[in-house]
Amino acid sequence: MSHKEFPKTYDFAATEESLYQWWWDKGYFKPSNDPAKADFDPDHKPYVISIPPPNVTGELHLGHAMFVSMEDLMIRYHRMKGIPTLWVPGTDHAGIATQMVVERSLNAAGIKREDLGREKFIEKTWEWKKQYHDRIVTQIRRLGASCDWDRERFTLDEGLSKAVREVFVKLYEDGLMYRGPRIVNWSPKLQTAVSDLEVEYSEESGFLYYFKYMLADGSGEFLSVATTRPETILGDTAVAVHPEDDRFKKYVGKMVVVPIIGRVIPIITDEYVDREFGTGAVKITPAHDPNDYRIGLTHNLPSINILTKDAKINEAGAPYTGLDRFECRKKLWADMKDAGLVIKEEAYKMNVPRSQRSGEIIEPMVSTQWFARMKPLADMALEAVRDGRITIIPEHFTKVYYNWLENIQDWCVSRQLWWGHRIPVWYCQDCGEMMVSRTDIEICTKCGSKNVEQDPDVLDTWFSSWLWPFSTLGWPEKTADYEYFYPTTMMETGYDILFFWVARMIMSGMYFTGKIPFSQIYLHGLVRDEHGKKMSKTKGNVVDPLTVMDELGTDALRFTLLVGSTAGNDTNLSVKKVEANRNFANKLWNAARFVLGCIEKTPSEPDRSEPIQPTLADTWIWARLQYLITDVERLFESHQYGEAGRQIYDYIWSEFADWYLEIAKNQTAQGGNIAFNTSRILVRVLDTCLRLLHPFTPFVTEAIWQKLKEAAIDLSDAYAPAGGWEDALIIAHWPVAEEKQSGDDQAIADMLQLQDVIRAIRNIRTEKNVKPGKQIPAIIAAAEKADLFRKYANILSSLAHLDQEKLQIVDQLKEIPAGVVTTATSGCGIYLEIADTIDKTAELARLQSELNETQSQIERLEKLLNSPFAEKAPAQVVANEREKLEKYISTAENLKNQIAGM
């Protein structure tokens, strides 16, 4: 292929979709689990990732973009290393989220789900799923996700539903699943229990209400108590103080009267009480506060639920029955004022629990639900991490993991929804028998009645996703996928769901399969805006990944997310960074065009009568590439992907594109074997760079590599990489560093010396406004490096635009010529004769402008240091400002001298 046929610019919009389809059609995403097939590799343990399943009704957001980019990088890297690689895709039925959007759609048409009934509503929801599933999957593919889509799973599909039933029944049979009243997070709007993950805490302004708890002995004495939720007074069953709080010792064991209600309750002691909160005496409402609930269990206190499912006061809260909880708060507080029981109110900041889905305030409430006992499972999961079978990256999250599992609570698994896995429990309406079964029950196993009804609740969405690593591979059946691909290898996800999903997957994997579900956990951080703030629609700082990909390309977005990330840390994203990485893709494209242009002008075969002698630049760029390969491999293996990407970027942008390509222009122009070898190195270096970069930016690298391969094959086998050309970059071999040669380090050191001098000359040319390309005379006093500079004077003069005929390289310079500009670097003195190349009028104007700005800074600092600031500010701060002043004064003197000299 001629470089003239290589488009001048990279058109990502015309490339990405067709490339992705080509990869899929060629079967590159599919590993084999069949020993009878040629591509089955029994000697290699496969590398497997189960995708964190996005909500089926979701829109692509930056969280998806982050995990897809990171996991695709891991998958592509291991695939290129020749390891059987499987990335299992799938989506989550997202019980609450999906039911909400479907109900909202029905409500807009004037229909309530109760009007349809359960079966019709579920039919409507399946229709919704089919409509929106393709949208989120297409968006995930847009990011380049090289998943095996033939193995895609859905948390409500037949196989996963069977796994869910098996797990529920197994837990019940083992005494780890029970039904009973416990405190849960209750969503009054959704009218269901919700998980901790679905509760978001926001700091909001409220009040601390102080009131009197009168002693029941008629003495007129009282305890001053404070609360943020006066309406819960109706459910109080005790007042508690700290056992070591001397202020209340005389009251312990006495009884007090619940305001307005008149119920008599005890004063107890408990170490949970915070003596600094309010007055040090706290009301205990076991049915409506999780901490009070635990105290209630400890002290055997009654639990009085005062709320209905829609958060109105029930009969237990008479005389306020029927009032909304917040209306009750106002009415009860007014009544307490009338009764002389109110002490005061004060403004108070509090963390308010709100439903992540519907936004209303969550109500802690005792409710009869199904619960899983987690302690036995947690002990197994703790041991798997402690003994090293599972590694958490970054390591500091290990302590967080331990802390959560060591203090784990039983899991409320039931939800009062219609969309989800129906709880596999049936109740006989005649004899009351409860039957837990893997298969549907139509006849009571005790009395033979057909009057049986299934539990109306469904299971928490997480109850299906905690089985994800093995249920997606066919468990509980012993499928070929399960036998070969399980346990999986890597679980990559956000650190914010370490407890709610990752820890639960470890527990279920250990308990139900007897194996760890994965050996490594990589936790990425949140994606924030360019200022480090959390993105939100209300703040107007949300970056839409689809818009970014439309405007700047998928590769640019992926590279920005990946190179900007480190495990466990949040990433700041700005569109400017994405634009810069779009420019990087274009620079890579242009470098490839240059390489193709070079090889079509050089010999296809070397002259066998002459030896091929690599130049300094040839040796340097190849040696640096071997170091890069070694470093990138080390960084990948230690999961430092962001740093690996940065080093690849720096090598391609600076060393290859900015330095070697410039030198290659001169070397290929010389013809013969030097041109042949230069072209061959260009091809091999570019080929290796594309391989290293491919996991980060799969589209542009594959597009370039295919064109490079085609052109090289057309020219000669001599341009082929060591292992030959593979069919596609996605399955090309990952680079392996060659052994270091004896002259490599010296070549690197020599080239660095040349680069330092060239940079110094370029800086002076820029500073003095020397016209680009203008060749200028120069003297280089290089001491013991003089021979090096003489040998490579052609590189020096070419890249620094020096007049080679007037270039003098000496050991020492006894006398500095008049009218030269001087500088020094790396032990070399540099003297440039540029007086006649400078536009003196423009240069004087520039110098005067710099002097004016410097004088302005001097005046500002002198005024500051002569003000009270010098006496009041810390000594180090004042010293820093004085040091700045001295530098500005020195700079001003230099500028004055330069102006005078001109």
Image: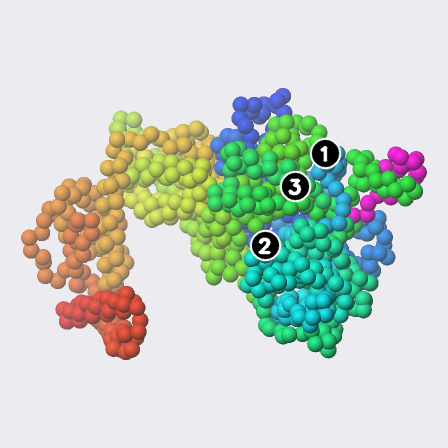
Structural distance between the alpha carbons of marks 2 and 1: 35 Å
Whether residue 819 appears in magenta in the rendering, the answer is no
Q: Secondary structure at mark 2?
A: loop
Residue 271 has which mark? 2
Residue 743, picture quadrant: top left
Name the residue at 38% across, 36% down: 630
N-terminal of the pair, mark 1 or mark 3, is: 1
Q: Main secondary structure of the magenta part?
A: loop
- Could you say which disc has been placed on residue 374 in the image? 3
Q: CA distance from mark 2 to mark 3?
A: 25 Å
**Crowd around label 1: few <14 · some 14–19 · many ≥20 (10 Å):** few
- The boundaries of the magenta stretch are 441-462
Q: Amino acid at mark 3?
A: Met
* Identity, as a three-letter code, of the amino acid under mark 1: Asp
Q: How is the image coloured?
A: rainbow
Q: Is residue 244 above or below residue 379?
A: below
Q: Is residue 169 left or right of residue 446?
A: left
Secondary structure under the numbered disc 1 in the rendered image = loop
Q: Is residue 153 above or below residue 368?
A: above
Give the crowd class for mark 3: few <14, some 14-19, many >=20 residues within 10 Å: some
SS type, badge 3: loop
Q: Disc 2 or 1, which lies upstream in sequence?
A: 1
Quadrant housing the N terminus: top left
User: What's the residue at 68%, 28% (across, down)?
Assistant: 479
